[in-house]
Amino acid sequence: MTSSSSETLRKVLEEAHLLRCSLLPGELISFSEDAADWDALLDIYSGDPDAELPESPPGRPVHFEVRTEDSDVWFDVELPLGYGSEGGDGIPSVAVKGPNLGRAEQQRWQAIVAEALDEVRGKEVSSSAQSEAAHPSPRYHALFTSHHLKSPQKRRSLSQWSHELSLTGFAKVGYPGVIYCEGAREDVEDFVSRVKSMQWLALRLRFIEPAPSEGRGESNVRGQWKEFEKVGEVVNEMRRLGRESFVVEMGIGSAGSNVASTR
Protein backbone atom coordinates (compact mmCIF):
# COMPACT_ATOMS: atom_id res chain seq x y z
CA MET A 1 0.00 0.00 0.00
CA THR A 2 1.40 3.41 -0.91
CA SER A 3 1.93 6.08 1.75
CA SER A 4 -0.90 8.15 0.27
CA SER A 5 -3.41 5.29 0.21
CA SER A 6 -2.42 4.26 3.75
CA GLU A 7 -2.98 7.83 4.98
CA THR A 8 -6.37 7.96 3.30
CA LEU A 9 -7.42 4.57 4.65
CA ARG A 10 -6.48 5.44 8.23
CA LYS A 11 -8.31 8.76 8.00
CA VAL A 12 -11.45 7.03 6.76
CA LEU A 13 -11.24 4.33 9.47
CA GLU A 14 -10.57 6.93 12.18
CA GLU A 15 -13.71 8.86 11.29
CA ALA A 16 -15.83 5.73 10.76
CA HIS A 17 -14.71 4.47 14.18
CA LEU A 18 -15.54 7.81 15.81
CA LEU A 19 -18.93 7.78 14.11
CA ARG A 20 -19.62 4.22 15.25
CA CYS A 21 -18.69 5.14 18.86
CA SER A 22 -21.02 8.16 18.69
CA LEU A 23 -24.13 6.20 17.70
CA LEU A 24 -26.97 5.93 20.17
CA PRO A 25 -29.01 2.73 20.68
CA GLY A 26 -31.09 2.11 17.56
CA GLU A 27 -28.73 4.02 15.26
CA LEU A 28 -26.80 2.09 12.60
CA ILE A 29 -23.90 2.64 10.21
CA SER A 30 -23.39 0.29 7.27
CA PHE A 31 -21.11 0.34 4.25
CA SER A 32 -22.97 0.30 0.95
CA GLU A 33 -20.14 -1.17 -1.17
CA ASP A 34 -17.43 -3.71 -0.26
CA ALA A 35 -19.20 -3.99 3.11
CA ALA A 36 -17.39 -7.15 4.27
CA ASP A 37 -13.96 -5.64 3.49
CA TRP A 38 -14.70 -2.35 5.21
CA ASP A 39 -16.26 -4.02 8.28
CA ALA A 40 -13.15 -6.19 8.65
CA LEU A 41 -10.83 -3.18 8.33
CA LEU A 42 -12.88 -1.21 10.86
CA ASP A 43 -12.73 -4.11 13.33
CA ILE A 44 -8.92 -4.20 12.98
CA TYR A 45 -8.66 -0.43 13.51
CA SER A 46 -11.04 -0.50 16.49
CA GLY A 47 -8.86 -3.11 18.18
CA ASP A 48 -5.59 -1.27 17.51
CA PRO A 49 -5.47 2.07 15.63
CA ASP A 50 -1.78 1.46 14.87
CA ALA A 51 -2.18 -2.06 13.51
CA GLU A 52 -0.75 -2.84 10.10
CA LEU A 53 -3.59 -2.67 7.61
CA PRO A 54 -4.04 -4.96 4.61
CA GLU A 55 -4.63 -3.63 1.11
CA SER A 56 -7.66 -1.36 0.97
CA PRO A 57 -10.80 -2.25 -1.02
CA PRO A 58 -10.97 -1.20 -4.72
CA GLY A 59 -10.01 2.38 -5.49
CA ARG A 60 -13.40 4.00 -5.52
CA PRO A 61 -15.16 6.42 -3.13
CA VAL A 62 -16.08 5.09 0.31
CA HIS A 63 -19.85 4.81 0.53
CA PHE A 64 -21.90 4.22 3.70
CA GLU A 65 -25.31 4.89 5.24
CA VAL A 66 -26.31 6.18 8.67
CA ARG A 67 -29.86 5.45 9.79
CA THR A 68 -32.11 4.57 12.71
CA GLU A 69 -33.93 1.27 13.05
CA ASP A 70 -37.41 2.83 13.17
CA SER A 71 -37.06 5.33 10.30
CA ASP A 72 -37.30 4.97 6.53
CA VAL A 73 -35.12 8.06 6.00
CA TRP A 74 -31.32 7.82 6.11
CA PHE A 75 -28.12 9.74 5.38
CA ASP A 76 -26.16 8.50 2.39
CA VAL A 77 -22.48 9.50 2.74
CA GLU A 78 -19.70 9.26 0.16
CA LEU A 79 -16.05 10.10 0.90
CA PRO A 80 -14.10 11.04 -2.24
CA LEU A 81 -10.90 9.34 -3.39
CA GLY A 82 -7.92 10.83 -1.57
CA TYR A 83 -10.08 11.86 1.40
CA GLY A 84 -7.88 12.99 4.28
CA SER A 85 -4.63 12.96 2.30
CA GLU A 86 -2.56 16.05 1.58
CA GLY A 87 -3.87 17.66 -1.56
CA GLY A 88 -6.86 15.29 -1.67
CA ASP A 89 -10.51 16.24 -1.82
CA GLY A 90 -11.68 16.58 1.79
CA ILE A 91 -15.35 17.35 1.16
CA PRO A 92 -17.75 14.45 1.78
CA SER A 93 -21.00 14.14 -0.12
CA VAL A 94 -24.06 13.76 2.11
CA ALA A 95 -27.52 13.05 0.73
CA VAL A 96 -30.81 12.37 2.51
CA LYS A 97 -32.72 9.44 1.06
CA GLY A 98 -35.88 7.46 1.71
CA PRO A 99 -38.47 5.53 -0.33
CA ASN A 100 -41.32 7.80 0.79
CA LEU A 101 -39.40 11.08 0.90
CA GLY A 102 -41.18 13.76 -1.13
CA ARG A 103 -39.33 16.33 -3.21
CA ALA A 104 -40.10 19.25 -0.88
CA GLU A 105 -39.11 17.26 2.21
CA GLN A 106 -35.90 16.10 0.58
CA GLN A 107 -34.98 19.68 -0.35
CA ARG A 108 -35.62 20.77 3.23
CA TRP A 109 -33.31 18.03 4.56
CA GLN A 110 -30.60 18.84 2.01
CA ALA A 111 -30.68 22.50 3.03
CA ILE A 112 -30.11 21.45 6.67
CA VAL A 113 -27.22 19.19 5.64
CA ALA A 114 -25.64 21.90 3.46
CA GLU A 115 -25.81 24.40 6.33
CA ALA A 116 -24.19 21.92 8.72
CA LEU A 117 -21.39 21.12 6.25
CA ASP A 118 -20.68 24.82 5.71
CA GLU A 119 -20.44 25.31 9.47
CA VAL A 120 -18.01 22.39 9.85
CA ARG A 121 -15.82 23.65 7.00
CA GLY A 122 -15.70 27.10 8.58
CA LYS A 123 -14.61 25.66 11.93
CA GLU A 124 -11.93 23.49 10.28
CA VAL A 125 -10.42 26.50 8.48
CA SER A 126 -10.50 28.61 11.65
CA SER A 127 -9.04 25.82 13.80
CA SER A 128 -6.25 25.14 11.30
CA ALA A 129 -5.26 28.82 11.14
CA GLN A 130 -5.24 29.18 14.92
CA SER A 131 -3.23 25.99 15.37
CA GLU A 132 -0.52 27.12 12.97
CA ALA A 133 -0.25 30.52 14.65
CA ALA A 134 -0.16 29.28 18.24
CA HIS A 135 2.70 27.67 20.11
CA PRO A 136 2.38 23.95 20.86
CA SER A 137 0.34 23.35 23.99
CA PRO A 138 2.13 21.66 26.91
CA ARG A 139 1.38 17.96 27.44
CA TYR A 140 -0.78 17.11 30.45
CA HIS A 141 -2.10 13.88 31.88
CA ALA A 142 -4.87 13.01 34.31
CA LEU A 143 -6.03 9.99 36.31
CA PHE A 144 -9.48 9.19 37.70
CA THR A 145 -10.64 6.32 39.88
CA SER A 146 -14.22 5.37 40.66
CA HIS A 147 -16.11 2.65 42.49
CA HIS A 148 -16.86 1.00 39.14
CA LEU A 149 -17.09 1.60 35.41
CA LYS A 150 -19.64 -0.60 33.67
CA SER A 151 -22.04 1.66 31.75
CA PRO A 152 -21.81 1.12 27.95
CA GLN A 153 -22.84 4.77 27.47
CA LYS A 154 -19.96 6.02 29.63
CA ARG A 155 -17.47 3.73 27.90
CA ARG A 156 -18.70 4.90 24.50
CA SER A 157 -18.45 8.54 25.57
CA LEU A 158 -14.88 8.12 26.87
CA SER A 159 -13.77 6.57 23.58
CA GLN A 160 -15.59 9.23 21.55
CA TRP A 161 -14.13 12.11 23.57
CA SER A 162 -10.58 10.72 23.38
CA HIS A 163 -10.75 10.66 19.58
CA GLU A 164 -12.46 14.05 19.38
CA LEU A 165 -9.82 15.66 21.61
CA SER A 166 -6.84 13.71 20.19
CA LEU A 167 -6.06 12.14 23.56
CA THR A 168 -4.34 8.88 24.35
CA GLY A 169 -5.19 6.74 27.34
CA PHE A 170 -7.36 3.95 28.64
CA ALA A 171 -10.32 2.96 30.79
CA LYS A 172 -10.26 0.02 33.17
CA VAL A 173 -13.83 -1.35 33.30
CA GLY A 174 -15.52 -3.23 36.12
CA TYR A 175 -14.53 -2.80 39.77
CA PRO A 176 -12.79 -0.44 40.39
CA GLY A 177 -12.99 1.96 37.46
CA VAL A 178 -9.78 3.67 36.32
CA ILE A 179 -9.49 6.36 33.62
CA TYR A 180 -6.18 7.77 32.37
CA CYS A 181 -5.57 10.26 29.56
CA GLU A 182 -2.79 12.36 28.08
CA GLY A 183 -2.76 15.15 25.52
CA ALA A 184 -2.62 18.89 25.07
CA ARG A 185 -3.39 20.78 28.29
CA GLU A 186 -6.66 22.34 27.11
CA ASP A 187 -7.88 19.01 25.72
CA VAL A 188 -7.10 17.12 28.93
CA GLU A 189 -8.87 19.82 30.96
CA ASP A 190 -11.88 19.57 28.63
CA PHE A 191 -11.91 15.77 29.01
CA VAL A 192 -11.69 16.01 32.81
CA SER A 193 -14.59 18.47 32.86
CA ARG A 194 -16.73 16.14 30.74
CA VAL A 195 -15.98 13.14 32.94
CA LYS A 196 -16.89 15.10 36.07
CA SER A 197 -20.21 16.14 34.51
CA MET A 198 -21.40 12.51 34.42
CA GLN A 199 -23.03 10.67 37.32
CA TRP A 200 -20.50 8.50 39.22
CA LEU A 201 -20.18 6.57 42.43
CA ALA A 202 -17.07 7.68 44.39
CA LEU A 203 -15.33 9.37 41.47
CA ARG A 204 -11.93 10.82 42.41
CA LEU A 205 -9.60 12.91 40.27
CA ARG A 206 -6.22 11.66 41.50
CA PHE A 207 -4.25 14.25 39.52
CA ILE A 208 -4.17 16.52 36.49
CA GLU A 209 -0.68 17.87 35.88
CA PRO A 210 2.08 18.31 33.29
CA ALA A 211 3.07 14.95 31.81
CA PRO A 212 6.67 13.93 32.39
CA SER A 213 8.80 14.35 29.29
CA GLU A 214 10.86 11.25 30.00
CA GLY A 215 9.60 7.71 29.60
CA ARG A 216 6.68 8.62 27.39
CA GLY A 217 6.98 5.40 25.41
CA GLU A 218 4.29 5.30 22.74
CA SER A 219 1.87 7.60 24.56
CA ASN A 220 2.05 10.29 21.88
CA VAL A 221 0.25 8.18 19.29
CA ARG A 222 -2.76 10.25 18.32
CA GLY A 223 -6.20 8.98 19.25
CA GLN A 224 -5.11 5.67 20.82
CA TRP A 225 -7.71 4.64 23.42
CA LYS A 226 -7.75 1.25 25.10
CA GLU A 227 -9.95 -0.68 27.51
CA PHE A 228 -8.71 -3.06 30.20
CA GLU A 229 -10.54 -5.45 32.52
CA LYS A 230 -7.83 -6.13 35.12
CA VAL A 231 -5.82 -3.89 37.43
CA GLY A 232 -2.70 -5.77 36.39
CA GLU A 233 -3.25 -4.64 32.81
CA VAL A 234 -3.37 -1.03 34.02
CA VAL A 235 -0.06 -1.44 35.85
CA ASN A 236 1.53 -3.11 32.83
CA GLU A 237 0.34 -0.34 30.51
CA MET A 238 1.70 2.38 32.80
CA ARG A 239 4.95 0.43 33.11
CA ARG A 240 5.15 0.33 29.29
CA LEU A 241 4.78 4.11 29.28
CA GLY A 242 7.42 4.53 31.99
CA ARG A 243 4.80 5.80 34.46
CA GLU A 244 4.13 2.83 36.70
CA SER A 245 4.71 4.85 39.87
CA PHE A 246 1.74 7.11 39.07
CA VAL A 247 -0.68 4.25 39.79
CA VAL A 248 1.30 2.05 42.20
CA GLU A 249 1.96 4.90 44.63
CA MET A 250 -1.80 5.51 44.80
CA GLY A 251 -2.55 1.93 45.73
CA ILE A 252 -3.69 0.82 42.27
CA GLY A 253 -2.05 -2.58 41.82
CA SER A 254 1.55 -3.16 42.88
CA ALA A 255 4.98 -3.09 41.33
CA GLY A 256 4.82 -6.86 40.91
CA SER A 257 1.38 -6.91 39.29
CA ASN A 258 0.87 -8.85 36.09
CA VAL A 259 -2.09 -9.57 33.87
CA ALA A 260 -2.30 -13.20 34.83
CA SER A 261 -2.46 -12.75 38.59
CA THR A 262 -4.16 -9.39 39.25
CA ARG A 263 -7.83 -8.58 38.82
Image (tube, helix red, strand yellow):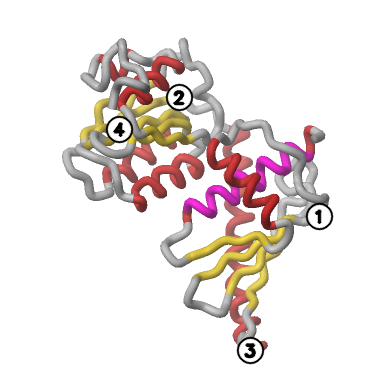
Residue type at tag 3: Gly
Q: Total number of numbered labels?
A: 4
Q: Which residue is mark 2?
A: 139
Q: Is residue 222 above or below residue 76?
A: above
Is 174 on the left or on the right of 186, as rendered? left
- At label 4, counting other C-alpha atoms closer than 10 Å, the crowd grade (few under 14, some 14-19, many 20 or more) is many
Q: Which residue is mark 1?
A: 60
The reply to whether dot 1 and dot 2 touch (C-beta < 8 Å) is no
Of the numbered discs 3 and 4, the one sitting upstream in the chain is 3
Q: Nearer the viewer, mark 1 or mark 2?
A: 1
Residue type at tag 2: Arg
| Mark 3 element type | loop
Q: Which residue is mark 4?
A: 178
Q: Is residue 171 magenta?
A: no
Q: What is the spatial separation of the Cα atoms under label 2 and label 4, in whole angstroms?
A: 20 Å
Q: Nearer the viewer, mark 3 or mark 1?
A: 1
How far from the left and from the top, in percent, is residue 230? 33, 29
Of the numbered discs 2 and 4, the one sitting upstream in the chain is 2
| Mark 4 element type | strand
